[in-house]
Structure formats: C-alpha cells, structure tokens
Amino acid sequence: MITEVELPGVVEPDGLRLRTREVPQLAPGQVLVRMEATGVSFAEQQMRRGKYYDQPPFPFVPGYDYVGVVEAVAEPDGGGLTVGQRVAALSKIGGWADRMVADAADLVPVPDGLGAEEVEAVIVNGVTARRMIEFAKVSRGDTVVVLGANGGVGSLLVQMARHRGARVVGVVSQRHLQYVRELGALAVDRTSDVAAAVREIAPDGVAAVFDHVGGSGIKTSWSMLARGGSLVSYGTASTRDQSGNAKLPILALMARLLLWRALPNGRTTTFFNLWAGRKRNVERYRTQLRADLDAVFEDLAQGTITARIARAFPLSAIADAVRYAESGTAAGKVVVVADQG
C-alpha cells in the first residue's frame, strides 16, 4: 500500500488528508521508491493556496523533492537501478508519500555516508542556489546580498557565495541575525533601511542580489546593484497571502524584470525557473540536473556546505510541518520523514 497526503483544494493545513491506495504495476523504466525524507518548501505553501504558477488541478499529492530507497524495479527494465539503492528526485509533486512510483531516468543516486535528512535539505534548495550563483557569476571579491539568508535556499546561497570568496550580506528578521553571522555573512535586520545599510557596506553597489520576496520590494533590490550587477529573483513571498489571480504577481514581477533588463545600464535581471528547458529537451534537462545534484552532494560530503534542518516531522503530522514552515520562525529546511512502523 501507498500512504500519501492529498491536497483537496485551497485549504488550511488541517485540510490536508492522508489517503491510501494500492501500489500500481510498474511500467518499463519505472521503480518504486520508499521515502526516507521529503520536505516543505515555499512551492507547497503556494500550492496550498492555489497560487503556484503551474500546479496541477486539485486534488493532487504535493511534495517537491524526496530522498529514498529503491524498493522494487520494473521487469525487465529498471533503468539500471537496483533494489536497496538510495536515490534522490526533484519531483515538483508527489513526494509527500511513504512510497512513490518514479521514472528511473528522473532519479539520481545518492553517495554513501550522507544522511537522508541532510540530503533532502539540499535537493531543490542546493540545485536552486548553485544555478543562481552561476547565473550571477559570483566570484572572489564580490559583495552579494541574500534576502532570507536563514532559509533553506538562502542559507545555501550564503555558503556557496562565501566558498567562492564573496562577501555576503544576509537580510533576515532579528531572530535570525546570529545564525546568519555564524554562516559568515554580515547580518542586516530586514525591518531596517536595508538599502542604506547595504550602501554603508558597499557604497558603489553590489555584484548580485538574490531576492525571493518579490512584490514592491524588488525595487529596493534593483537599487542596490552596481553597474554590471545581477538581480536574481526566485519567488514572490511578499504576495503569498494576497487574494486574487494567482498568476498576476509573478507576471507583474517578470514584466518589471524584463523592463529593467532592457535598460542600458549594464545591470541584468532574471526570474529563476528550476524547470526551464525540461519540456524542450527532457534528456538534456535530466543530464544537467544529475550533474548539479552530483556537485551539490559532493559539496555536502566534503563539508563545503552544511544542511540546516529546521525541524523534522513524521508524514502523519504534515499539517504541523506546514504550519511550522509558514510560521516564519524556521531556520533551514523543514523536513518530513516516513512514519516509523
């Protein structure tokens, strides 16, 4: 049997429902994965509100990524995977379950010696941070700004940028200032005049700003850039609880970014989309994802990055996990693990 979490519609966390179903017959190239850890990301928070840009129709099973163990493979073709092998996947949906049927081609082997929870904390977050750092061409001597530097993506952005020799300014709420300092960043209270604080640190502007907030505050992020700098937008957290058309905030944000990009001032912008290119060339997408995950897992194994687990919840307590993730108090990744027994 498969036990999974159904999102039936726009509901509060208590409206999430556990359901069970039979394990379907595996098709060639598919495997059955027993979940060890999944998580709660901003994407699922948006899906719960019906506001994730391209979420499927209700009802469906959320779960953006997961790590687990191969429990069964299709005969005669299991895609080269073997029973007992640990794998990770970027799934977008379907990860909030104790077992998942997946295409073997979408699974990436996990190196020995890494714990399931720490791997879960760097799947979507690690690939996102790595690709955005590369887009911005962060290098030694740069100063960069990371909004939400205490979060799952933000904390990895800080670590990756510092590993490249950059100076990092982390913008967080007061409760997270010390944590961000421990990561090696200069900490700025997000309720202060952030632009003024950054100008004191970097009078000529910064090389990159990583902004998950969106909304009207994106203008502040743009204003902090030096000539040649990059504004990397990857979310609309400020509009999470707004009512109305779910697509309008992101469309407005993307239009603004495109307008700024066209200006002749040497600065550039992007709205980061982790799924870009998959529909055009799925094999190329899978190859790049495997390379990125291999690099992130290597960084984790070598201690170049550390996975910060805010808290772990059993799958049966998914409502509590979502509430905690949405509380604004979490530092790091909110992880969901399989129930024992």
Image: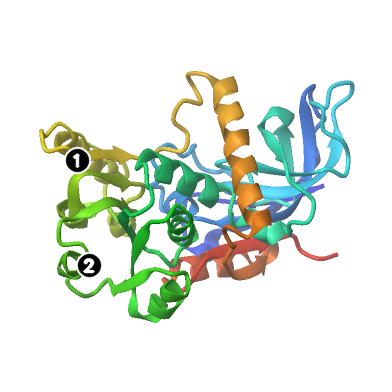
Q: Position of residue 274 (x, y in %)?
A: 46, 38
Pick the residue in front: 29 or 260.
260
**From this viewpoint, is residue 20 visible?**
no
The residue wearing badge 1 is: 267
The circle drawn on residue 32 is: none
The answer to whether residue 311 is above or below residue 130 is below
Q: Position of residue 52 (x, y in %)?
A: 41, 45
Occupied quadrant, residue 80 = top right
Label 1 and label 2: CA atoms lie apart by 19 Å
Mark 2 closeness class: few <14, some 14–19, many ≥20 residues within 10 Å:
some
Q: Residue at x 75, y 47 (%)?
A: 111
The answer to whether residue 218 is above or below residue 135 is below
Q: Identify the residue at the far front of this view.
A: 141
Question: Which residue type does callout 2 highlight?
Answer: Ile
Judged from the image, the secondary structure of the residue bearing numbered disc 1 is: loop
Q: Identify the residue at the far left of this view.
A: 264
The residue wearing badge 2 is: 201
Q: Position of residue 226 (x, y in %)?
A: 18, 50
Camera-near label (1 vs 2) is 2
Occupied quadrant, residue 45 = bottom left
